[in-house]
Amino acid sequence: MRRGCGVLLPISSLPSPHGVGDLGPEAYRFVDFLRESGQCLWQILPIGPTDPALDNSPYHSPSAFAGNPAFISLELLVEEGFLDRKDLEGIVPFGEGWADYERAMALRERLLDRAWAAFRGSRSWQWEAFLEENAHWLWDYCAFKALKAHFGGSPWYRWPEPFRSHHPGVIEWARENLGEYLEKEAFLQFLFFKQWKALKARCEQRGILVVGDVPIYVPHDSADVWANQQISQLDDRGRPLAVAGVPPDYFSRRGQRWGNPLYRWEVLKERRYDWWVRRIRHNLQLFDVLRIDHFRGFVAYWAIDPDCPDARRGRWMEAPAEDFFGELERHFPRLPFIAEDLGVITADVREVMARFGLPGMKVLLFAFGEDFPNSPYLPHNYPRNCVAYTGTHDNNTLLGWFLEEASAAERERLFRYTGRRLEPEELPWELIRILMASVADVVIVPMQDLLGLGSWARMNRPSTSNGNWRWRLKPSQIDGDLPPRLREMAWTYGRL
């Protein structure tokens, strides 16, 4: 990637009149804001369907391929002829600044049912082309959703045979017996990707590259694991033989137990990583660059005993990283990836990143600890081939960190680095300026830090199960002097 800068803002955090950010007019306005501000990248979080029972986390989706119906713009459905203008009349206004998933999805379900009723039985070249191009994942996903409803919401590994084992003929049975449900789910995906394609075209017109996010693992109860059981470490009843996570460390004496099934890398290798090739190809049709989450898991992964309630009973297992990325490089030359390499990263992970020229991540919030001034997260230690952030979706905001988390020693190191004592309101833009002036090829700043917001605006608090993924941008917050101020900084440090 050329020297440039961008903004991290999830789709869910966009303004919208209908409770949660979507792909409608405010998304287009945000793209125009990026262009006006001299930015060339827009980084988002995963866009798959979310589960209210899991706090609508974008990292726990039942599909690695599907889009989130919550992001379908009702306003655009009117313009596209799927709804009538009067369908949007009388909607009780939603508040700004916070996502209301429960009300937003209730509204969308009602109106999307109405759109489906009007479309049912219709045929168009766009619809037929969508079904053909996405057949490799679409009907598995739609059947998964239909069968899950048919079996009372039970996870697939508790379904009766032959449904549990994804026996040949199950998809045909579902289409014959639950066809209305399958067709409607396919229609929702058609609407989502139709709107996404149009928004992506607007990004291309404005010279904005979109950075997508690819989690390494998929949840156990997902269409992907159900339909591809042979590539996951499962027993003959679909139960994990080992689950994913990270071992105990300085930050967590019990480690982190994520619970996702692990891959059978030997089977994937024999098949030349076909599922992963399809997944990456699908994502590169949606995004220009992919952030690969938990990159170290492609080199060696922590396999946890499935009966262990935490991550202490585990072992490191090697993965065929060089063969895997070599195969991806054969399909996708000059791999457009950002490696999420935060935490304890070993030499073998660095070697793989160097072998394939993959930029890593540098997070400024991590820079002022006891390893100062030798921290790899301090800008004077950056290599050019990296992506520098003030923080990520899992961190506090800059202001929130400074006021609530930074120790007195960390504050003193920060002041020493900036050359002066800063008032809290000065801090975010001073640290953004330092990042912009660094040699890092790319700088990406969360929208909350550009606005100088406190901890109440952070996206996620790891290890908490509710109240996350809620913050939203207000329409007025990208007006005023923010665009020219950001553009001037991008120009000053050669990032235009």
Image: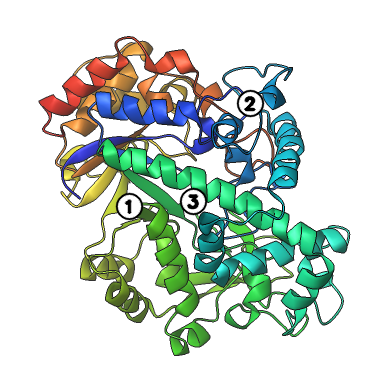
**Residue 108, percent from left and from top:** 70, 36
Q: How is the image coloured?
A: rainbow
**Residue 423, percent from left and from top:** 33, 11
Q: Which quadrant of the structure image shows residue 330?
A: bottom left
Dot 1 or dot 3: first in sequence order is 3
Dot 2 or dot 1: first in sequence order is 2
**Image vertical order of residue 83 relative to residue 15, above or below:** below
Residue flagged by tag 3: what amino acid is it? Answer: Tyr
Q: Residues within 10 Å of mark 1 (few under 14, many from 20)?
A: some
Instruction: Identify the residue under disc 1.
Output: 288
Residue flagged by tag 1: what amino acid is it? Answer: Asp
Task: Please report the residue visible at 50 percent of the width from the left and 47 percent of the height from the top.
Answer: 194
Instruction: Identify the residue under disc 2.
Output: 18
Residue flagged by tag 2: what amino acid is it? Answer: His
**Image vertical order of residue 71 relative to residue 75, above or below:** below
SS of the residue under disc 2: loop
Task: Please report the residue visible at 73 percent of the width from the left and 32 percent of the height from the top.
Answer: 107
**Image vertical order of residue 309 relative to residue 82, above or below:** below
Q: Nearer the viewer, residue 440 or 283?
A: 283
